[in-house]
Amino acid sequence: MTILNLPAWRRRTAHAWGVAGSVFAGSAGALALAASATAAAVKLPEPSATEPPEPAWQAVRAAGAELAAQLARHCPLAAPGDSTAFDACRRALFDNAPLRGRLNEVVLWGRQRNASLALKDTGLTQFAPDVLAGMYLPLFMFNGEHRVQWVGAEGLFQIRLATAFRNRLSPGQFPYPFWHEDDKWATYQNASELLLWWDPSAGIVKVAQFTTHGGRAPLQAVRWQAAPSFDGRWMWTDTNGRTQPKVSLFDGLYRNDNPYLPRLEASYKALALRLRESQCDQCHVPDNPDKSKRLVLLQTPAHAAGEIRRLLDAVREDRMPRDQTGIEAPLDAPLKRALLEQGDAFATLLDAARGWEQQRRDATQSAASTQR
Ligand code: HEC
């Protein structure tokens, strides 16, 4: 197993991806913008001084036990660079209806920088369940150890799962270069617990965090991996001419013979150019130049796929893009039309790709039941 494959990583082609040069290169020069509006997408409860009644405890304990068992079964401890274990975990979680059923339609995700910082003041990223289950949760390993606690200040339960992070995968197996920020990469590497914040009134996980602040060590000793250098590119082309990060191209999530995959990638590239012309990459990239507390990511096919419906609605209704003061700044008509057309084309291909996967799953299942 290559250890972050540093030489190849440095040798990756400089001109990279997309007709007009790099798509969504880092916005190092972007202005630091005023703090933006708080999220509307995920409604968090009010603080609550009283503990929830016993049935709520029973529900969260049952959910915690079920989630911990599933994660331990599909994503057990392995060497931190073991691709086979990682792929098996990813595929199992992505396809995993019970897990996704436990996740809110938008889940907030991010590191816990400070255990006493309120969630409302914590910068988090908004993810569709597929994105979290297919690209982020699989980066962690589990052994089933967990505990449940009530956090009255948030009005939420915490399901705390013991974990360790796969810090020795190759760069294209991470959804984007987490090492663009030293502290982010360090927190990922040293994570010892995964926190699933459970809303008792909705019976669902609304926030997920990874933390080093649990007072325990990671499930296995961390062989520290220094952060490779980051050149500002969220996507790049490797020395074999392949687009990276490959996990963000549905690699291993959809079947390799899914006939829509190549067109999906091409369609995203075309969409990405429109997004850039529309200034979306001024804000919707991992380094979060707009300092949004509820960041939305659009910089890879898989990230954009998770948001495509909201993206189309937001543009159609002129809610996006915004200007640097956070006020709607509608696109001119031709650009808006081109962006919507390309977005629709990407959404249609996605539906086709997902439909094909579903058919294959159904066919495999019915073949299995005929044999029985
Ligand atoms: C100046 C910064 C900025 C720019 C430029 C920008 N956005 Fe946003 N966008 C935000 C912020 C901030 C939010 C979070 C809003 C919230 O949830 O409070 C957001 C939210 C979103 C959302 C999810 C929430 C929703 O409204 O449904 C989508 C989708 C989105 N933006 C798409 C786009 C697209 C597409 C573009 C380009 C056409 C764009 N944005 C340009 C700042 C920006």
Image (spheres, grey):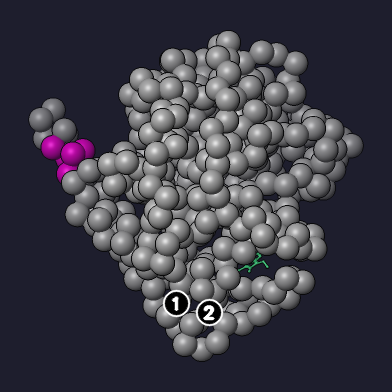
- Residue at image position (38%, 23%) is 2
Residue extending farthest to the right is 49
Dividing the picture into quadrants, the one containing residue 33 is bottom right
Question: Badge 1: how crowded within 10 Å, few (<14), some, or many (20+)?
Answer: some
Q: In the picture, which quadrant includes the N terminus?
A: top left
Say if 128 sits above or below 230 in the image. below
Image check: 240 left or right of 85? Answer: left
Mark 2 to mark 1 CA distance (whole Å):
7 Å
Mark 1, residue position: 340
Residue in the picture at 27% in, 41% down: 240
Q: Amino acid at mark 2?
A: Arg
Say whether residue 144 is visible: no
Q: Which quarter of the figure has residue 75?
A: top left
Neighbourhood count class around disc 2 (C-alpha, 10 Å): few under 14, some 14–19, many 20 upward: some
Q: Which residue is mark 2?
A: 316
**Of helix, strand and loop, which one carries label 1?**
helix
In magenta, the rendered stretch is 363-367
Of the two numbered discs 2 and 1 in the rendering, the one whose residue sits closer to the viewer: 1
Q: Quadrant of residue 187?
A: top right
Residue at (50, 82) in percent of width and height = 336
Question: In this orientation, which residue lies closer to the viewer: 153 or 87?
Answer: 87
Amino acid carrying label 1: it is Leu
Q: Position of residue 27 (x, y in %)?
A: 61, 58
